[in-house]
Image (cartoon, grey):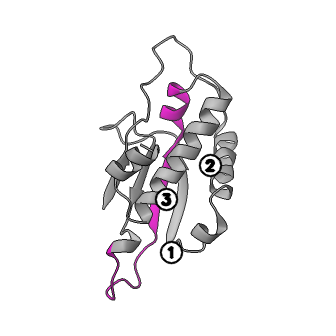
Amino acid sequence: MRCRTAPVRAPVPDNDHVLEMTREEFEELVAEALDRIPPELMRLMDNVAVFVEDEPPADDPELLGLYEGTPLTDRGEWYAGVLPDRITVYRGPTLRMCDSREDVVAETEVTVVHEIAHHFGIDDARLHTLGYG
């Protein structure tokens, strides 16, 4: 299952300004967002790895995050010996759509929660209802 996260707000108008943040700083924001996930939920996550990439696939340049794998709700007895699910958070589009560090922190947190929710089998419609669209 490939779940694509659409931007949760319109990109910042092209003002020739892209927020600067190193890859290491952005990775730290993703780690901090993961640290804010309640421990009882983190314990339920199974066989999933989180990555940061600079840019999404060329066919979807505004993609902020991507979940690739089999949600927990779809796993059965057959689920064994498979590679980990993959959550990827994309730095480039996030920095292009945000105009402050605070915006990046908030957007990163929303993206991380959104992709983890896909791991738990929550679909986009429900995430939009909950404010994590």
Q: Are marks 2 and 1 in contact (CB under 8 Å)?
A: no
Element type at mark 1: loop
Where is 70 relative to 58, above or below?
A: below
Element type at mark 3: helix
Element type at mark 2: helix
For image coordinates 64% across by 24% down, the residue present is 100
Comparing marks 3 and 2, which lies closer to the viewer?
Answer: 3
Q: Are marks 1 and 3 in contact (CB under 8 Å)?
A: no
- Magenta part of the protein: which range? 74-97
Q: Which residue is mark 1?
A: 46
Please tell me whether residue 75 belongs to the stretch shown in magenta: yes
Please tell me whether residue 31 belongs to the stretch shown in magenta: no
Q: Amino acid at mark 2?
A: Val
For image coordinates 48% across by 20% down, the residue present is 12
Q: Which residue is mark 2?
A: 30
Q: Residues within 10 Å of mark 2 (few under 14, many from 20)?
A: many
For image coordinates 67% across by 55% down, the residue present is 36
Identify the image quadrant of the C terminus. Answer: top left
Q: Amino acid at mark 3?
A: Ile
Q: Which residue is mark 3?
A: 116
**Sequence order check, earlier mark of 2 and 1:** 2
